[in-house]
Amino acid sequence: MSKAPNPTRIQKKNRAAILDAALEIFSTHGFRGATVDQIATEAGLSKPNLLYYFPSKEAIFNELMAGLLDTWLDPLRSLDPNGDPLQEILSYVQRKLQMSRDFPRESRLYANEIVQGAPRLLDTISSDLKRLVEEKSALLDTWMAAGKINRTHPKHLLFSIWSLTQHYADFDVQVRSLMGSEDPYDAAPEFLETLYRRMLTPRD
Amino acid sequence: MSKAPNPTRIQKKNRAAILDAALEIFSTHGFRGATVDQIATEAGLSKPNLLYYFPSKEAIFNELMAGLLDTWLDPLRSLDPNGDPLQEILSYVQRKLQMSRDFPRESRLYANEIVQGAPRLLDTISSDLKRLVEEKSALLDTWMAAGKINRTHPKHLLFSIWSLTQHYADFDVQVRSLMGSEDPYDAAPEFLETLYRRMLTPRD
DNA sequence: CATTGATTTGACCAACTGGTAAAACTCACG
DNA sequence: CGTGAGTTTTACCAGTTGGTCAAATCAATG
């Protein structure tokens, strides 16, 4: 987007290495806690060499964030108005859980940013994310009105899904420390399936 | 604990101001993101003056953490083996939610630390917290075995409570941004009550 | 294989950060 | 009101950090 339209082989490789290294470092130390030197070393480059590919620390962070949000919201986007309501939500929960398992660094990067007040992300949240949430809340509302799922506050329902699934990535060190040798992801899918099935199955 | 046994009036006031300022700054910027100068300014002191009361940045942080964990785990500790199981859990959830509302900075301070791998807290987690979690998981187990509440994985149940309640403090900026003018805490108590009642009420 | 553009490096800088030392000031108490 | 402990400030330092620049090296094209 900002770099040359014809990236060389080396450019492609190094920019990818830098972004991967930055994801690792930013997600475990936050923006201010991360140093350009750390990222460069992790990427196998010298600091000035890294700054040959990106104009600044903040530029790296922004590019990372832009790429992140897109894939991050994919599961929610694909909530299908034409599918079976309960099944759609249960699948969404499982996909979201799978993302926590597969991309924990992305989850922690996001968590770091939000916990600290989202100084570099608030605009995106209150425009793009808000639009998507409004759309999907409305969908949930129609499902509830039609009696397909139990009536609750749709936004709180979405928050709960995010919270429960991302917890396994964001609080990974605590979860694992408390579960000992047991892998958290062994029981998590069934736990969440049960929880949301009981929560949402219409009754009486 | 480490300071003089007979704190003067000024000492009491300034140490309290420093700890409050530190909570504010650490919880919004993380340990590395916070500067001693920021904390001092927030507390209405000069940097050297602050360092007259605490030997180092890390000492402030540690004192904050020590105080935090104690009150943080109080609600879980008071889960009563002799109470009504479902009511005990529902009360625990509401108490925990109340803490998110009343002490969001404490919650975010903790979140910051865990997300970043708990470098200064892992020992406490895997000793004190682990012991408490083992004890309360066992209690939940007996309640499940006795058919008082629905059978699930007790540790995942605890994680879910932490995750759902702390989410309102830790992701406050996102939650509020998406809820517009509606106060998240208006609907949250009922949402969580419904969720856990449905999840835990024994059936057939 | 030469040359030119792409890449990498070493030396460097200004701003910032955590922390120190000693002088200056303030306050409670006799 | 003087005096000494308690408190605050001024000046400072050494290490770190984000970022620059020119020189050196590398790679692909003709």
Image (cartoon, coloured by chain):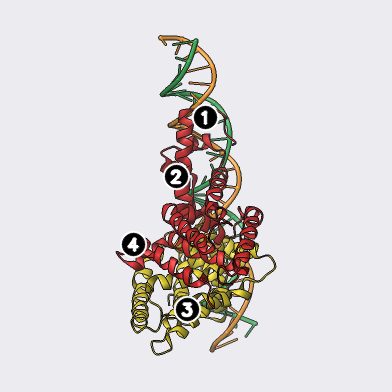
Chain colours: A yellow, B red, C green, D orange
Percent coordinates x, y for residue B27 in the rendering: 47, 53
Q: Which mark is residue B7?
A: 1
Judging from the image, mark 4 belongs to the subunit labelled B
Callout 3 secondary element: helix
- Across and down, in percent, residue B173 comes to 39, 62
Tell me which numbered mark, 2 or 1, is placed earlier along the sequence: 1
* Residue corresponding to mark 2: B21
In the picture of the structure, the residue carrying the numbered disc 4 is B183
Q: Earlier in the sequence, mark 2 or mark 4?
A: 2
Marks 4 and 1 share the same chain = yes
Q: CA distance from mark 2 to mark 4?
A: 26 Å
Report how far apart the C-alphas of labels 2 and 3 lie in the structure. Answer: 37 Å
Foreground mark, 2 or 4? 4
Instruction: Kindly identify which chain the residue marked by label 2 belongs to.
Output: B
Q: Are marks 2 and 3 on the same chain?
A: no
Q: Residues within 10 Å of mark 4 (few under 14, many from 20)?
A: few
Q: Residue at x 44, y 59 (%)?
A: B169
In three-dimensional space, the C-alpha distance between marks 2 and 1, rounded to whole angstroms, equals: 19 Å
Q: Amino acid at mark 3?
A: Thr
